[in-house]
Amino acid sequence: MLSFMSTVQLRVSSPAFGPNTMIPTRYTCEGENTSPALMVQDLPKGTKTLALIVHDPDAAMKGGFTHWVAFNIDPVTNIPQEFKGGVQALNGANKLGYMGPCPPSGTHHYHFMVYALDTMLNLPKETNKDQLEKAMVGHILAQGEVIGLYKKANG
């Protein structure tokens, strides 16, 4: 998670799963591979846009695997299931949009991180996680996350 000077925290949750509980199969590669709904509370005054990163630090590659990158999302408190708004950017497979959990073995942790920003970001949709994180520096008003777990049926 990026660090920033403010101590303001967003409260991020999902009606699909609780903190540190299993993500339902429908949101994974074994199901419909669609994004779960997210609820965002405590948006600070001055929030112009939201950014979203879903990252699996347990993936067996340097730095983990990024499942979703999106930015310039209207500052809403409900990001619906199957969300396609904002700018859907590049995940770790170099594809645009959400890619559900699909760990090859074991239980992995999926960090659904939401950032409240004080600006729109002038970035192309071909932006990846690292590029988004660099562009957000100095613009993060608050951030928060909810962590979901997943293990494949045969994993």
Image (tube, rainbow, N blue to C red):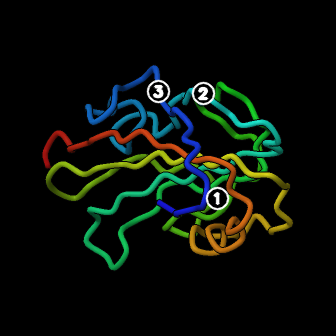
- Say whether disc 1 or disc 3 marks the residue closer to the N-terminus: 3
- Say whether disc 3 or disc 2 marks the residue closer to the N-terminus: 3
* Residue depicted at 33% across the width and 32% down the height: 19
Label 1 – label 2 distance at C-alpha: 26 Å
Looking at the image, residue 155 sits to the left or right of residue 112; the answer is left
Q: Amino acid at mark 3?
A: Ser
Q: Are marks 1 and 3 in contact (CB under 8 Å)?
A: no
* Residue depicted at 56% across the width and 37% down the height: 10
Q: Are marks 1 and 2 in contact (CB under 8 Å)?
A: no
Q: Secondary structure at mark 3?
A: loop
**Residue assigned mark 2:** 41
**Residue assigned mark 1:** 96
Nearest to the observer: residue 139 or residue 89: 139
Q: Secondary structure at mark 1?
A: loop
Nearest to the observer: residue 122 or residue 98: 122
Q: Amino acid at mark 2?
A: Gln
